[in-house]
Image (cartoon, coloured by chain):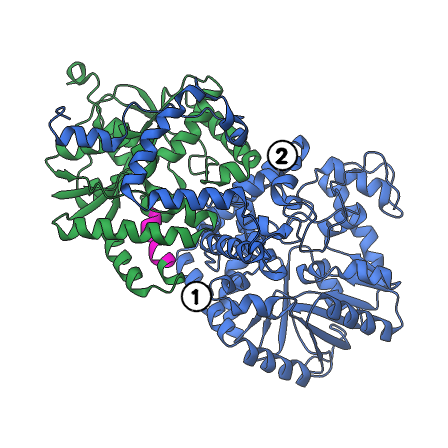
């Protein structure tokens, strides 16, 4: 299958390893990955902060970029982010309609229908749970709010993680509670955000995991920032990085 | 009012109105977050209620279908509101009641005051009610020389403490039983000074105190959970039975009800009486459900001693018509005040109800309060739609399926629009400038690629997770509790371009 990568602005600029890992996993499974270089940002930050006027231009840019990719033969769009896919699926048409642009709303809906978060693409569209990964470490998984409650990915990321060779997957207490990131919420309500982060860090430490993983680089940036700030020694890795890993494959297999 | 040493009142300043505080959310929250007793009380109470709710909701096989029905009934109600209210008025009147229409809080307070005055009484007993909290009725009556006694146990505690409710269902959730014992011991007339903080002892003390009030009072004041348009029947659901006392013993009953509480049909109650108790108290069925239609003796078969001889229904607008006019925001009027959204909200759990500055706290308060008072671009309530990480837990538990996160996002846009129209030719906020700049950069891939490349120039200012130089003051909110990420050597698009040109194998 030809798959267009929607890298997300955050992974492109700050966490390219998550995006490279997404390419690695999909190519290992025999798919062709294309990267429409015109892409920039889906506009979620503007939408969620109240700047829908500015978001509109970004939505239009995103829709134009990825409808071209679909027209040129891509069968799906994938992003290593539940939050950005959530914005594409649940906000793009809304932003267009609020601005009175019905034509853009309909184009946005077409792109949204073909846009998937990584675990959705792998489990639902491609029908795989074993992606041939190996990662012999103690790992705990945080289901990010938008993947859980906007996209309803359910246990798809866990299905994928359970198939990883050598992994010691431990359950995170109060896993489905928000880590406190929430985009500009972490700046505008920094104190409340920190109080939420503090509880999340406590729960992560309770698992005695070496690695915290999730499907969103943004939430990982937040939780990782807190874990490093407190010098906990817990690493954060995107779900895609674990799925791309072949660490110690020789020893296990 | 005199201040007792050790009185557990956490109210900071007089609120500017019952639905708008004096400090914006971030400032109020900062103080609450530092209150260790409050944090412990709230953390414990919300987690207990969350657990109870999840258990009893899990038992209902058609829960999702019930939610869909409730949403459909509420949507129909809002579409037919004027007609249904007139039908309700006709049926209440036909059953011997009197209906009054109140445009706002002042008008409602005046109507209730005049009705109490007409009875010649100077005290009333009250059923727990959000509508009367919203209009500040007790304070108004006090100014007019009428004493209003709250009879719901938690409301009684809050009233005696001269505190403010901090939760829709559990108004004293911010207080521990040790603190409640202190309130009773110092403020409750005739209380046993040896009172302990055992829940049963506290309940018995309140019972003795209230029993006399119930038997003495000639006027009761209530809100309503539902009103059925086709029959003119009002409903109050409760757990204690104190509401039942107020609704049946006094000769005169005055009910203040928000106009959105009307339901078209009697059979609609089937849906809501299943959803409400499980969502709110985590009970399968609430212990007391009181229905009344007009006055006693008016309708055949109601000649007994129960029920009011005189019944007045005050229909309260107070901003609801404006909310109804907004296509997105109007779903906030579907709320049945169960407070499930408060109990699951990670923000509410940590900041408590007083941080919201309104009698409607939590996620529902964050969408209802600013709509009732109006988003002006610079009001205190303009900060409420931002008091959420948009985690969506509230939407999942809402029994009438109010999409709170989407409404929050819409209200944020309305806030920015109001701010922009206020700013006019004046200098826009730093945030507005930053958002405009980011949008300009991100609308074009060349500008975007150049910007992400140039982030590496910031490296000297970012060392070991800490910020130095000019950014450090701007980013204090972030970096005081979180390290900043390390900048990568190469953006993804640089890596991709190199790979495409055969630079490396990938």
Judged by its main secondary structure, the magenta piece is helix
- How crowded is the residue under tag 2: few (<14 C-alpha within 10 Å), some, or many (20+)? many
- What tint does the image give chain A? green
Mark in the foreground, 2 or 1:
2
Q: Which residue is mark 2?
A: B33
Q: Which mark is residue A201?
A: none
* Label 2: which secondary element: helix
* Label 1: which secondary element: helix
The residue shown at (83%, 52%) is: B209
Q: Residue B335's x, y, as percent?
A: 54, 60
* Quadrant of residue B174 within the rendered picture: top right
Task: Tell which chain the image draws in blue.
Answer: B
Q: Residue B306's x, y, as percent?
A: 74, 72
State yes or no: residue A93 in magenta.
yes
User: As drawn, is B41 to the left or to the right of B59?
Assistant: right
Q: Which residues are magenta?
A: A86-95
User: As drawn, is B220 to the left or to the right of B216?
Assistant: left
**Chain containing the residue with disc 1:** B
State yes or no: residue B456 in magenta.
no
């Amino acid at each position: 299958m030809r798959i267009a990568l929607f890298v997300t602005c955050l992974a492109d600029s700050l966490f390219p390893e998550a995006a490279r890992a997404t390419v690695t996993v999909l190519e290992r499974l025999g798919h062709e990955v294309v990267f429409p270089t015109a892409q920039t940002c889906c506009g979620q930050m503007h939408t969620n902060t109240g700047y829908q006027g500015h978001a509109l231009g970004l939505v239009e840019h995103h829709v134009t970029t990825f409808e071209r990719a679909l027209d040129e033969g891509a069968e799906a769009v994938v992003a290593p982010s539940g939050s950005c896919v959530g914005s594409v699926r649940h906000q793009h048409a809304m932003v267009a309609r609020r601005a009175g642009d019905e034509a853009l709303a309909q184009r946005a809906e077409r792109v949204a229908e073909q846009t998937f978060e990584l675990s959705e693409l792998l489990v639902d569209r491609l029908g795989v749970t074993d992606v041939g990964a190996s990662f012999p470490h103690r790992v705990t998984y945080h289901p990010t709010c938008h993947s859980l409650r906007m996209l309803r990915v359910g246990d798809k990321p866990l299905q994928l993680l359970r198939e990883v060779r050598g992994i010691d997957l431990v359950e995170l207490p109060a896993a489905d509670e928000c880590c406190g990131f929430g985009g500009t919420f972490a700046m505008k309500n920094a104190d409340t955000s920190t109080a939420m982060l503090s509880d999340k860090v406590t729960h992560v430490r309770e698992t005695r995991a070496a690695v915290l993983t999730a499907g969103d680089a943004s939430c990982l940036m937040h939780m990782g920032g807190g874990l490093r700030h407190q010098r906990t020694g817990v690493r954060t890795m995107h779900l895609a990085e674990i799925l791309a890993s072949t660490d110690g494959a020789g020893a296990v297999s | 009012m005199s201040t007792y040493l050790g009185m557990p009142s956490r109210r900071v300043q007089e609120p500017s109105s019952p639905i708008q505080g004096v400090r914006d959310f971030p400032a109020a929250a900062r103080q609450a977050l530092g209150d260790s007793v409050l944090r412990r009380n709230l953390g414990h109470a919300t987690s207990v209620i969350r657990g109870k709710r999840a258990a009893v909701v899990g038992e209902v096989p058609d829960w999702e279908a019930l939610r869909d029905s409730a949403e459909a009934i509420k949507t129909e109600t809002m579409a037919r509101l004027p007609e249904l209210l007139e039908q309700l008025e006709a049926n209440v009147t036909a059953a011997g009641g009197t209906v009054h229409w109140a445009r706002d809080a002042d008008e409602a307070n005046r109507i209730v005051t005049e009705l109490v005055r007409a009875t010649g009484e100077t005290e009333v007993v009250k059923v727990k009610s959000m509508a009367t909290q919203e209009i500040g009725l007790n304070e108004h009556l006090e100014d007019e020389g009428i004493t209003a006694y709250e009879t719901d146990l938690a409301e009684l505690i809050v009233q005696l403490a001269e505190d403010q409710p901090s939760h829709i269902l559990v108004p004293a959730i911010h207080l521990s039983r040790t603190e409640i014992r202190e309130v009773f011991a110092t403020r409750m007339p005739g209380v046993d000074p040896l009172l302990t903080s055992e829940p049963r002892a506290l309940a018995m003390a309140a019972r003795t105190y209230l029993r006399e009030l119930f038997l003495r009072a000639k006027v009761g004041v209530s809100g309503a959970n539902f009103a059925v348009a086709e029959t003119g029947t009002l409903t109050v659901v409760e757990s204690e039975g104190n509401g039942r006392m107020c609704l049946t013993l006094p000769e005169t009953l005055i009910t203040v009800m928000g106009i959105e509480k009307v339901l078209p049909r009697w059979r609609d109650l089937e849906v809501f009486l299943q959803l409400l108790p499980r969502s709110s108290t985590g009970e399968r069925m609430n212990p007391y459900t009181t229905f009344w239609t007009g006055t006693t003796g008016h309708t055949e078969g109601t000649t007994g001693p129960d029920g009011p001889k005189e019944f007045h229904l005050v229909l309260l607008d107070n901003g609801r018509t404006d909310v109804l006019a907004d296509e997105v925001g109007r779903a906030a009027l579907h709320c049945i005040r169960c407070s499930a959204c408060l109990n699951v909200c990670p923000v509410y759990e940590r900041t408590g109800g007083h941080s919201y500055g309104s009698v409607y706290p939590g996620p529902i308060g964050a969408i209802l309060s600013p709509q009732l008072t109006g988003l002006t671009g610079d009001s205190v309530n303009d900060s409420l739609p931002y008091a959420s990480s948009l985690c969506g837990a509230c939407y999942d538990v809402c029994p009438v399926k109010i999409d709170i996160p989407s409404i929050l996002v819409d209200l944020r846009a309305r806030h920015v629009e109001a701010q922009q129209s206020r700013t006019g030719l004046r200098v826009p906020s730093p945030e507005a400038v930053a958002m405009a700049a980011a949008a300009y950069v991100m609308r074009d891939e060349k500008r975007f690629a150049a910007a992400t490349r140039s982030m590496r120039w910031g490296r000297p200012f970012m060392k070991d997770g800490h910020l130095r130089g000019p950014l450090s003051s701007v980013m204090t909110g972030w970096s005081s509790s979180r390290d900043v990420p390390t900048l990568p050597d190469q953006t993804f698009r640089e890596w991709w371009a190199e790979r495409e040109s055969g630079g490396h194998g990938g």
